Image (spheres, rainbow, N blue to C red):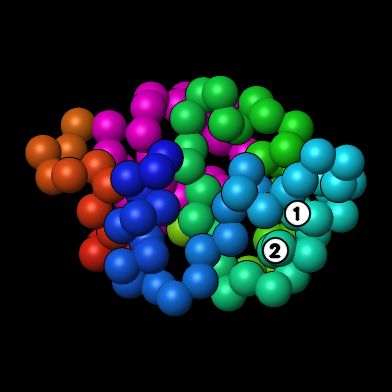
Amino acid sequence: MERLKHSLRSVSSHIWHDIDQIYVGDKWRNEIQIGIQKADELILIVSNASIKSEAVLYEIKLATEHDKAIRPILISDVAYNDMPKELSSIQYLDLRKSTQDPYACSTI
């Protein structure tokens, strides 16, 4: 994840990542809501684990409600039927079998 953040920072001046900006005692739902409201877009790492995460589903819901662009990056096989409906019509960056650096962000 650190390599991805570093690569994203090379093409954008501000990256908000919950792990870096939600502190002990903070109400994470409130902080995520504020982060998404301030964001221009949501870059979403898509894996079987992420699409089953309550937090990730909440982030997708908020981004959709606030008309934020969602940029999915597929890093492992996910069955189409398991994909959240909000993502089913969005083109994703497929890094499952990529020969390029999986953390290169020039195509996002």
Residue in the image at 81% along x and 39% along y = 24
**SS for callout 2:** helix
Q: Can residue 88 be seen in this view?
A: yes
Q: How many labels does the image show?
A: 2
* Magenta residue span: 72-96
Residue 15 to residue 99: above or below: below
Residue 86 percent location from the top left of the image: 63, 50
Q: How crowded is mark 1: few (under 14 residues within 10 Å), some or many (20 or more)?
A: many
**Which residue carries the number 1 mark?**
32
Q: In this view, does 46 lie to the left or right of 34?
A: left
Residue 21 to residue 84: above or below: below
Q: Quadrant of residue 95?
A: top left
- For the residues marked 1 and 2, what is the alpha-carbon distance in whole angstroms? 6 Å
Residue in the image at 51% along x and 71% along y = 14
**Which residue carries the number 2 mark?**
36
Residue 103 percent location from the top left of the image: 28, 47
In this rendered view, identify the residue nearer to me: 79 or 45. 45
Where residue 66 is drawn, which disc sits there? Answer: none
Q: Residues within 10 Å of mark 2 (few under 14, many from 20)?
A: some
Q: In this view, does 49 lie to the left or right of 76?
A: right
Extreme left residue here? 99
Residue 40 percent location from the top left of the image: 58, 74
In this rendered view, identify the residue nearer to me: 25 or 37. 25
Q: Which amino acid does label 1 sit on?
A: Ile
The reply to whether the C-beta atoms of the residues labelled 1 and 2 are less than 8 Å apart is yes
Quadrant that contains the N terminus: top left
Residue in the image at 17% along x and 44% along y = 101
**SS for callout 1:** helix
Q: Is residue 44 left or right of residue 63?
A: left
